[in-house]
Image (cartoon, grey):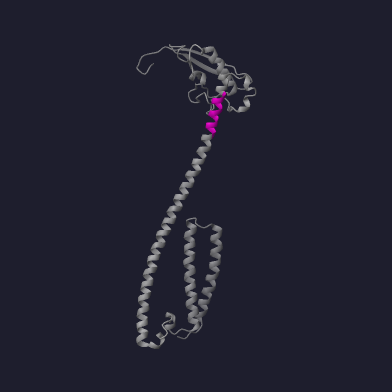
Amino acid sequence: MHNDGTEVNLLRATGCVHVANSTTPTIPLVICLHENYPQKAPLVFVSLHPMTPIHRHHPFVDNTTGATSPPYILTWKYPPCNLSELLRNLVQLFTIDNPFSYTPTTPACLTHPWLVSTKEALDRLVGMLHYDMVALRASTSDEIEKLSLLQEELKRRDRFITSMVAELGEERMRLEERVKNWAEETDRVENWLRVNDGRSLNARDVEIEDAFEMDETTRARLESSAADLAIEEVMYKLDKALEHEVVSFDSYIKQVRSLARQQFFHRCNEMASTSSPTSV
């Protein structure tokens, strides 16, 4: 039936094609002749059977419908083209590339290219180009998939770096605020010392710790406590870096062991200095 609703009569012929030098079964064909044949090319189908499926990459046969479209049909022109030559061409095509077995056409098939007709050479060329396109499409698909995974990884890292930059910016603002507060505290302490102990500020290069009386034991305890807190902060940052896969697990373990060893000694020193008598 045409697209406009009018009916068309087709002459339908069925049969099998025997392919030489092949272990596969004969190829069942259905040929439908249009009412305008021979001006219009015949419709050729390979009969579908669940026991002998058509391989999906055949260049001339659709594996879902069995529709066959070799160059001979696509370039059909009467009177040079006829049904007997079409069948002969199909036999040659299926000898080169059987629809029931995956045998990609390769240049090695052209043992004697000077003995090959123009149509056969065209069929072989179309087959080789088709399989080249299939292989290129497969490799391109794999490459696109890998690039997509890489893109997702880069996006993940970008989000992590952006969050880290934002966090560092906030940390910088907090530190600047602390510096400002320390500067104000320093001014207040200097003013207090100027009133109560002006001699200690004569040199103008006095450290803030020197303003308070402190023995060696107390100083050691403060230094150990400060080192302990600093190591604790570094280990927290390492945990975050491992969580976001910025550092490897082996590197993480190595650094944590080293830091834990240092932290242990600092805590031991702090405990020892705390237990010993101090004077203030």
Q: Position of residue 241 (x, y in %)?
A: 48, 59
Identified at 42% across, 59% down, the residue is 165
Q: Position of residue 279 (x, y in %)?
A: 47, 86
Q: Is residue 22 visible?
A: no
* Front residue of 125 and 280: 125
Q: Is residue 225 above or below residue 71?
A: below
* Region rendered in magenta: 124-135
- Looking at the rendered image, the quarter that the N terminus falls into is top left
* Front residue of 117 and 273: 117
Q: Is residue 173 above or below residue 94?
A: below
200 sits left or right of 91 in the view: left
Q: Position of residue 162 (x, y in %)?
A: 42, 56
Q: Quadrant of residue 2?
A: top left
Q: Give yes or no for residue 134 being in the magenta stretch.
A: yes
Q: Is residue 227 visible?
A: yes
Main secondary structure along the magenta-highlighted residues: helix
Identified at 40% across, 88% down, the residue is 199
Q: Position of residue 78 (x, y in %)?
A: 48, 12
Q: Quadrant of residue 135?
A: top right
Identified at 46% across, 67% down, the residue is 233
Q: Give yes or no for residue 183 being in the magenta stretch.
A: no
Q: Residue furthest front?
A: 114
Question: What count of labels does the image hold?
Answer: 0
- Looking at the rendered image, the quarter that the C terminus falls into is bottom left
Q: Is residue 154 above or below residue 36?
A: below
